[in-house]
Each structure stands twice: as C-alpha cells, then as structure tokens.
Amino acid sequence: MNDEIFPLTANYDEDWVRQNSYDGLTLYCLESLCQVLPLEKDMRVLDLGCGWIIGSIFLAKEFNVQVWGVDKERSPTGNYNRVLKADCDNQVFPIRADARDLPFPEAFFDAVVSIDAYSYFGVDERYLPYLCRFIKPGGLIGIVDGCFTRELNSLSDVPAYLKPLYLDDEDPWFPVHSVDWWKNFWEKTGKVKVLTAEILPQNDFIWQMYIEICKDMEREQTLIDALQNDTENLIALFRMVGKKL
Ligand SMILES: C[S@@+](CC[C@H](N)C(=O)[O-])C[C@H]1O[C@@H](n2cnc3c(N)ncnc32)[C@H](O)[C@@H]1O
C-alpha cells in the first residue's frame, strides 16, 4: 500500500527512517509536499528544522538538488555522518543554526521546505518576511505541519479530549491553526502568493501509520489518545506552498 500512496518513500528502509526521525513520518510528509512544490535539478534548497537530515537526503537523491539542512538542536557532525553514509556529501550540507538567525546570503535559495518544524518559529508574524530575504524572487517555500480542521479561537472552543495536547507544557498545540488561518497569515505579509494550502490528501493514511509506529512510545501517548478520541477529525496535517513575490 505504501508503494501506491508514496512510491518514492517506498524505496527507503523503514528502520532507517524510524531511527532517524521523531515519529517515522518525515518522508511521507515530504513526498506529499513535493507533489505540489516542483523541484528541478541543481536547485538550492533549505531544509529548515531538518532534524536528523533524512529529508534533505531524500530531496538530494530524488530530485538531484543541493540541500542545506539546518537545525538548532541536532549535531552537524552526526548529520554529516548520515549524509556520508547515504553517499551524498557533495549535495547535502548540515548546519547547526537557529531558523531565526540564518547564516546565508540574501536571495540564495530557490526553495525552502520545512517538515513538522515551521510552527516552532514561524508563528511570529515577522518570521515569513525574514525568511523570504534568503529566497530568490519567484522562489518557493513549502511546509507540512499539524493543523486543525477549524480554527480554535479561545480555550472554550477546545474539546476536552484535545486539552492535554493543546496545553502540554513541553510541546503545546495552541500555536496550531486551521489551513485558512495559515493561508491568510502568509498572504497578509504581501511577501508571498499562496499556491497551495490544503489538508494532505494522504492525511488518514499518515495518522494510521503514526499510531502504528508510535504506539509504544511514551512521549507520543498524548497525541495518540487525542487522535483516537477525535471523532470530529479536528486534528490533521496540511501542506502549504507560497511563491515569493
Ligand atoms: C519534530 S522535528 C522535525 C524534524 C524533521 N524536519 C523531520 O520531519 O524529521 C522539529 C525540528 O525542528 C527543530 N527546530 C525547532 N526550533 C528550531 C529553530 N528555531 N531553528 C532551527 N531548528 C529548530 C528541532 O530541533 C527539531 O529537530
């Protein structure tokens, strides 16, 4: 079934993906994004909040692009070793940096991608204009992240089953929004035209995989419980692509 839904991801070892990601979903989300974010050979791509850099490796191998994998926590040496093992050290460059303090020239990148990371820094209204400085005119920025299928405007809108996740001390979900909220949030800056903003077509499959992969992980139980009680399908994953104006 993976082969039909995610033909590119199906070529990668599942254990490698699971061992080098938080929840095993990185390549599913990235392949879904690439369906609406066209990449061409030799493009320069920034993978923002790259984690263990497997998404950057995937992009280099599948699309023959050059990728700078930036993460503020992950060791660049550990990531470089993964890149070496994957035999793409001439195409993937690991860097430890904060997304809010990027060490690149202006107008350097053809595209930026960010998988399950953008809402850690991108909900500051000043962030998109900052990030756009590093993208060429006409370049693309694409993200995949968690969302809600309707906007929660106050704490009283939050259903009981969602509260433990929403108010979690370590990784709260109150910076999570609806797709329409995100589209407007980007477009009102005047910096991008949003080309795509939608729930992932593979949303249900990915959550099913998430529950299967993470069922024994203690740190994922709050989200698993919320998903299992989410009869109104409030919790979802979305993809959004903007073109720099
Ligand atoms: C849930 S992980 C996703 C990692 C990777 N994109 C993936 O899908 O496997 C979020 C990543 O964002 C990184 N991150 C969070 N805030 C960041 C920031 N301000 N600058 C750079 N990276 C950040 C974290 O260190 C973490 O590795």
Image (cartoon, rainbow, N blue to C red):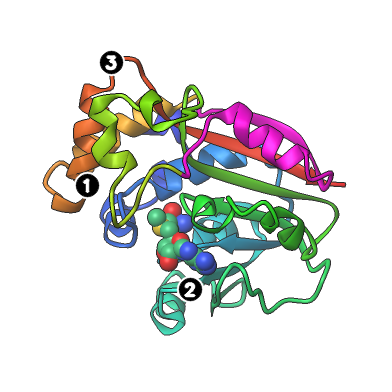
Q: CA distance from mark 3 to mark 1?
A: 19 Å
Q: Earlier in the sequence, mark 2 or mark 1?
A: 2
| Image location of residue 153, percent across then percent down | 49, 29
Label 2, ligand 1: CB separation under 8 Å: yes
The answer to whether any part of residue 4 appears in the image is no
| Image location of residue 12, percent across then percent down | 38, 51
Q: In this figure, which residue is indicated by the disc labeled 3?
A: 231
- SS under mark 3: loop
Please give left or right for residue 173 compared with residue 211 in the image. right
Dot 2, how many residues are within 10 Å of its Cα: few (below 14), some (14-19), or many (20+)? some
> Measured along the vertical axis of the image, is residue 132 above or below residue 74?
above
Q: CA distance from mark 2 to mark 1?
A: 22 Å
Residue 51: image tag:
none
Give the magenta-colored segment's residue range: 175-200
Q: In this figure, which residue is indicated by the disc labeled 1?
A: 220
* Residue at the (30%, 57%) spot, across then down: 170
- SS under mark 2: loop
| Image location of residue 68, percent across then percent down | 61, 70
Which quadrant does ligand 1 occupy?
bottom left
- SS under mark 1: helix
* Residue at the (40%, 24%) spot, across then down: 157
Q: In this figure, which residue is indicated by the disc labeled 2?
A: 72
Label 1, ligand 1: CB separation under 8 Å: no
Work out whether residue 16 or residue 52 is closer to the camera in this orientation and state it: 52
Q: Quadrant of residue 33?
A: top right
Q: Earlier in the sequence, mark 2 or mark 3?
A: 2
Q: Are marks 2 and 1 in contact (CB under 8 Å)?
A: no
* Residue at the (55%, 77%) spot, across then down: 97
Amino acid on which the number 1 mark rests in the picture: Glu
Amino acid on which the number 2 mark rests in the picture: Lys
The residue sitting at the bottom extreme is 77
Amino acid on which the number 3 mark rests in the picture: Thr
